[in-house]
Amino acid sequence: MGRRSDHGRDELEALILEAGAAVLAEGGYARFSAREVAKRIGYSVGTVMHVFGNVDRLVMEINARTFAAWTLWLEERLAHAQGRQRILVLVDGYFAFAREHRNLWSAIYEHRLPDAMDFAETLVTHRRKLTGVIAREVAAVLPEATETTITTLTGSLIATVHGHCAFLLGGTFALIGVEHPQALAETRVLEILAANGADLP
Amino acid sequence: MGRRSDHGRDELEALILEAGAAVLAEGGYARFSAREVAKRIGYSVGTVMHVFGNVDRLVMEINARTFAAWTLWLEERLAHAQGRQRILVLVDGYFAFAREHRNLWSAIYEHRLPDAMDFAETLVTHRRKLTGVIAREVAAVLPEATETTITTLTGSLIATVHGHCAFLLGGTFALIGVEHPQALAETRVLEILAANGADLP
DNA sequence: CCGAAAATCGAACACTGTACAATAAATAAT
DNA sequence: ATTATTTATTGTACAGTGTTCGATTTTCGG
């Protein structure tokens, strides 16, 4: 019983996104369902499809939302840190967010969009924003580096931390008997930064 | 039209696994279907379920098969390399295998098994075997290191390479403008090994 | 050869995403 | 004000999915 008068287009979009994020957070990507989202907000499936076109785009928009939330969350944590601590806050910020929002975090990587489809613009924007925060901190410890060096090194550092986090939450590290993955990631990050001439205060 | 006389239990298991790997390789994890596997080998869905219990276990067994194939493939490549080249063969072995068997590789990480379920034994075994090959090579360049150090460092190195490869094939690096991810991963691996006192010939 | 055990099938069940005609509502035009 | 037109929303249909389970075969032990 969708009521057009109750919610404007943007309002409805936000409603679907919020309910969608809840469904995703509760059941994970495997159990995600557009029908369940529709049910929760009291609209029919058709409406959800009409607003987002298809499920893949809906998931991408939810993932974009996750990136946006992650950015805010990270900036808040950074506000209370100084010097080299800021780098460690970034690493801990990755692990802690992934742990605390396991299903939302996993969905980012479990959702592989069809070859014919490309990334939603909001996803691109919000992901770049999050990367930008990290690049800013990397630049701060590498004052002499060029922009491309910062971009490249930032990407490499995120990939490194991501790899460790993915292996932790995916069970790989437990399987092969590796302990304290976060400490391991921190060590790697500091090593890499040191090897690239970082000035770590 | 299943013909019990045609295939023994093990034979049937292998048949399903091979067809399953083909389905997975062709359509990726998202399009994988036990029904399609059954159709291909001329048995009914019920039989496939009867042999593997549920789809998650089937996927795990296919993934185990992928790990086994990966190990053989890697050892073959290692046979022609010496010295520090062996380390680079490992990195290239990760990227090349993932690229050449994109869907099979992706399935390993896209498939998240339900919380209540644990890893199939064959998956554990074959994954450990692959890790073992890498650990052996890491140990070769770190003669003084203890076994736990080797295990930990090996896990960390794999996680690092995996992170870079996942970001390459997942489109993250393209999104944030990072080029030559494999070269980046190689640099990281050599840096990490150097920082941990490796003797790189 | 016959009875027990195991394998295989095929049909149900409750889901899924997507497509689309029918209906309802809001807006624009006259 | 009353149409006409656009838009939103629904509900249904379709082709899939994994899983369950009774019925039917087939195999094997005694």
Image (cartoon, coloured by chain):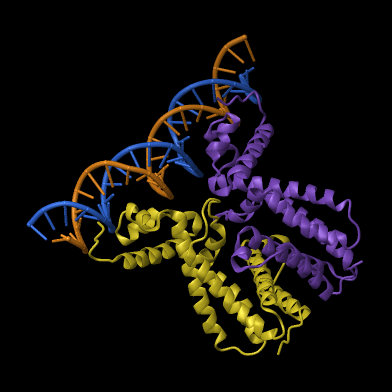
Chain colours: A purple, B yellow, C blue, D orange
- Going 50% across and 78% down the picture, which residue do you hit? B72
- Where is A22 relative to A168, above or below? above
Residue occupying image coordinates x 53% and y 35%: A45
Point 55% across, 83% down: residue: B77
Return the residue nearer the eye: B36 or B10: B10
Q: How many marks?
A: 0
The residue at the point 33 percent across, 52 percent down is B46
In the depicted structure, whether residue C22 falls above or below residue A66: above
User: Residue B76, image x and y in percent?
Assistant: 52, 83
In the rendered image, the vertical position of residue B100 relative to residue C10, given as above or below:
below
Determine if residue B25 is in view: no
Residue A76 seen? yes
Q: Where does the image place residue B130, in percent across and percent down from the top left?
A: 55, 74
Image-based side of B174 in relation to B41, left or right: right
Q: Is A65 in front, or is B34?
A: B34
Quadrant of the snapshot with the C terminus of chain B: bottom right
User: Percent from the top left, x then y, of residue B149?
Assistant: 70, 75
**Left or right of A74, for residue D26:** left
Q: Identify the image quadrant of the N terminus of chain B.
A: bottom left
- Residue D30 percent coordinates (x, y): 17, 60
- On the image, which quarter does residue A143 sit in? bottom right
Residue C13 sits in quarter: top left
